[in-house]
Amino acid sequence: MISIPPTILRGLLSLLGKKSIADRLLSSLAVDDRMTRNVLGWSPAFSVEDGLKQTVNWYQTIKAKN
């Protein structure tokens, strides 16, 4: 495995006519799970915001013990 800076990889793939591949590889991943939630009838136990708050509280508790 070798490390290739994203700008170089994007340039090389663009030169090869593979710009769409570069866009998929180097862009942020975004997932729309609405259909899955609807089909399965599932919803998360808590929101992202609540999950982050819980994580921060847990981390602060751990750090306070050390």
Image (cartoon, helix red, strand yellow):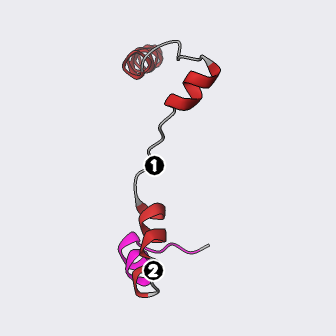
The amino acid type of the residue labelled 1 equals Leu
Task: Report x, y in % for residue 36.
Answer: 58, 29
Task: Report x, y in % for residue 8.
Answer: 39, 79
Kindly identify which residue carries mark 1. 29
Query: Looking at the picture, does residue 8 appear above or below residue 60?
Result: below
Q: What is the CA distance from the residue labelled 2 to the residue labelled 1?
A: 19 Å
Q: What element carries label 2?
A: helix
Q: What element carries label 1?
A: loop
The magenta stretch spans residue 5: yes
Neighbor class of circle 1 (other Cα within 10 Å; few <14, some 14-19, many 20+) is few
Q: Which of 56 and 40 is in front in this view?
A: 40
The amino acid type of the residue labelled 2 equals Leu
Query: Looking at the picture, does residue 66 appear above or below residue 36?
Result: above
Q: Residue at x 41, y 65 (%)?
A: 23
Q: Give the range drawn in magenta.
A: 2-12
Say the numbered circle drawn on residue 2.
none
Q: Residue at x 44, y 44 (%)?
A: 30
Task: Report x, y in % for residue 59.
Answer: 44, 21
Neighbor class of circle 2 (other Cα within 10 Å; few <14, some 14-19, many 20+) is some
Q: Residue at x 59, y 17 (%)?
A: 42
The magenta stretch spans residue 36: no
Task: Report x, y in % for residue 7.
Answer: 35, 74
Q: Residue at x 47, y 13 (%)?
A: 46
Q: Main secondary structure of the magenta part?
A: helix
- Asked if disc 2 and disc 1 are in contact, CB closer than 8 Å, the reply is no
Kindly identify which residue carries mark 2. 13
Q: Nearer the viewer, residue 15 or 48?
A: 15
